Amino acid sequence: MWFKNKETGNVWEIASKDLIKRLKKDDNYEVIEKEEENNTEKSITELSVKDAIKLVSECKETDMLKEWAEAEAKAENRESLLKRVESRINALSE
């Protein structure tokens, strides 16, 4: 299912049933229709470190940050980005 962050305009494909339920209830997100062939969004592992760090700093969803951390750890394992994601998760958890 695809969601759009109303503040940032970022679009995400979400597979987690729990996260889908939460985002449907969150006024900052809206469900959108998105066709796979028109998908121009990049996963966090395809973004430059600078763009990924910006995205992480704007994210307020701990579950999303955890998913990104897992994806990044499996991909290039960019240490500077992983530290930012972990730091953001900790800040939101407090």
Image (spheres, helix red, strand yellow):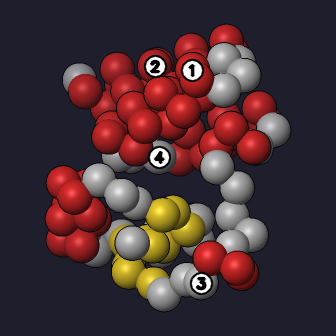
Residue under label 2, please give it: 86
- Of the numbered discs 2 and 1, the one sitting upstream in the chain is 1
Mark 3 or mark 4: which is in front?
Answer: 3
Observer-nearest of 53 and 41: 41
Label 2, label 3: how far apart the Cα atoms are: 32 Å
Label placed on residue 35: 3
The label shown at residue 73 is: 1
Mark 4, other Cα within 10 Å: few <14 / some 14–19 / many ≥20: some
Residue with the mark numbered 4 = 59
Quadrant for residue 47, please give it. top right
Any part of residue 84 in sight: no
- Residue at 43% across, 37% down: 67
The mark lying in front, picked from 2 and 3, is 3
Q: What residue is rendered at 66% in x and 17% in y? A: 77
How far apart are the two marked residues, 4 and 1, measured between alpha carbons?
18 Å
**Which element type, helix, strand or loop, lies under badge 1?**
helix
Q: Residues within 10 Å of mark 2 (few under 14, many from 20)?
A: some
